Amino acid sequence: MRLVILGGVAAGTKAAARARREYPDADVTIVTQDEYVAYAGCGLPYFVGGEISEAKELIVRTPDEFKQENGINVLTRHQATRIDPATHEVQVRDLTTGTDSLFPYDKLIIATGAVPILPNIDGITLKRVSTVRGLTDAKKIRALLDTGKLKTAVVIGGGFIGLEMAENLGRQGLHVKVVELKAAILPGFDPEIAALAQKHLLEHGVEVFTGEAVTRILGNAHGEAIGVETNARTLEADLVILSAGIRPNTEVAAAAGINTDHRGLILVDEYLQTNLPDIFAVGDCASVRNRITGKDTYSPMGSTANKTGRVVVANLFAPTEAFPGVQGTTIVRLFKLNAARTGLSTDEARDAGFDVETVLVPTPDRAHYYPGNRMIITKLIADKPTHRLLGAQVIGEGVVDKPIDTLALGIAMGITVDQLSGMDLAYTPPFASALSSSLVAANVMLNKLAGKLRGVSPDQLALDDPMLQLLDVRSEPEFLISSIPGAINIPLQELLQRRDELEPTRPTVVVCKVGRRAYSAALQLQRLGFTDVRILDGGMTGWPYETE
Ligand SMILES: Cc1cc2nc3c(=O)[nH]c(=O)nc-3n(C[C@H](O)[C@H](O)[C@H](O)COP(=O)(O)OP(=O)(O)OC[C@H]3O[C@@H](n4cnc5c(N)ncnc54)[C@H](O)[C@@H]3O)c2cc1C
């Protein structure tokens, strides 16, 4: 078999390595236009930030190693320019010599990945303006930082890569600002979780401007970036990072008659086969199925690229191994804050037609008395009629990867909140609480689903509603440190004596630190005849907005 693979980063090299094991006699060739192959793109921000000191640490295997250890031919700086499905040939240009040659294939795997979307503004070709896609970009940025002359940076785009870059530049002492076109950073997270991340970034000196568009990059007489203009302000910037999203790199595939969608994403079936015989597509250039909605989706993730690169090899001769799809599991570290998600967000769940209930529950990540415990906030999203768990987000300074992976597994298996509540999870004080964070969140959700508790998410709290009675039941000292504007403070112990200070017919939202006291207060108020009582989900711990 002559197997030709286009693209040699994550998906392409994964496929090549497995193909070599499965088909020892195959002639396997990777064609890639890049200078580097098999590097860890996900590690680039940490190389820029200096946590990874040498670029070579990110290179998993060199072309020579592929040849010597695996018998795989790797052609770097070779670009596939045309695929001819009829003759089973790929035309390839040697980017060094400019010569073209034809590569016949029996099976073709397209793993041409994605390219950054460049905003259509003046100044993007200035020096000290860079995307962050490959090692070449990362080395260029690292070299600029090593001059020691950069003081300020603007990151255009508040997605994962932009924010990882903001963190890594900020950790090196640069004054970093992020400009994001959408209303919130961290796509895929719910707004109040993204707002918590934004607050944390600000606490670490990274200011984020949401709902703002960069209109121009400003340069000096040497052709170097010195700032950006947005539709609202001018920001100084010795370095501008373009991180405004990516698009699938699929022009060559589309020109060959391979089906793509409106985004240019190559459409594949569950066996990762395109509409054309013997042509497959994997990684950032191909669609995958969302395992909850069943719809085609874009998952430009290293995790997806590696998995699809592996699975595709089983299907080269017959549809053997279906790729089960993705559910949007991701994780990011921003200074001391960790944020992770899996499954559907609240809006995604509603858009998919579910009748949604949510909870936002702060807990320590291990026993509250054990040294080193840190707060995490768990958001669960469930379907009201069936109690099926649809999504989860966990954010905080504590450990979030363990709960999110547990929840991801549960969601993949179609778990209900009731089943989650009964899970036998590991417990000892240094690692968890007797009721671990996910189980506490499941129990709060069950109370909500049973109608025992009504809540309001921080982003839905209508502070401007003149009828709203916002009751803070924490102690007076806690209240004085920080409170939500307009809140009335009646500590839980005084609630019964001071109930006349409240009006039973007005909508009442009760808040405390994490929700426990607010729940008790809400139950008391309901018994006293208050008609519309809700608690603020997440309490003050999960409140990401202004305080007094
Ligand atoms: C800074 C950064 C941080 C990231 N962090 C994470 C993370 O923490 N977690 C996570 O899951 N994912 C992360 N990702 C995403 C992850 O790196 C990508 O999903 C992954 O690299 C995709 O691999 P791929 O092989 O599909 O495509 P790519 O990595 O895009 O590789 C495709 C290759 O194909 C080559 N190519 C394109 N067209 C042609 C052609 N016509 N002929 C020949 N060669 C061609 C390209 O030059 C490129 O070398 C991050 C990405 C970046 C950039």
Image: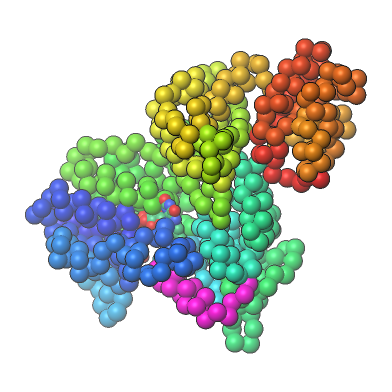
Q: Is residue 328 visible?
A: no
Q: Nearer the viewer, residue 209 or 257?
A: 209
Q: How is the image coloured?
A: rainbow
Q: Is residue 517 above or below residue 385?
A: below
The answer to whether residue 254 is left or right of residue 13 is right
Quadrant in which the C terminus is drawn = top right
Residue at 23% x, 68% y is 63
Residue range (magenta): 135-153
- Residue 386 visible, this orientation: yes
Question: Magenta stretch: dominant SS?
Answer: helix
Whole-percent x, y for residue 470 in the image: 81, 31
Which quadrant of the picture is home to ligand 1?
Answer: bottom left
Position of 299 with respect to 65 (left or right) is right
Q: Is residue 192 above or below residue 355?
A: below
* Extreme-bottom residue of the structure: 221
Question: Residue 411 occupies which quadrant of the picture?
Answer: top left
Give the quarter of the image for residue 150.
bottom right
Name the one closer to the observer, 146 or 63.
146
**Spot occupied by residue 241 in the image (x, y as percentages of width and height):** 55, 67
Left or right relative to 274: residue 157: right
x and y percentages locating residue 339 in the rendered image? 54, 46
Instruction: Please state the horizontal and vertical placement of residue 86, each as a whole percent of the image.
Output: 22, 55
Q: Does 427 appear above or below 130?
A: above
| Residue closest to the far right | 500
Give the residue at x 85% y 38%.
486
In the displayed orientation, state which residue is furthest to the left: 25
Residue 224 is one of the magenta-drawn residues: no
- Pick whichever, 407 or 240, lies toward us: 407
- In the image, 23: left or right of 520? left
The residue positioned 28% from the left and 37% from the top of the image is 322
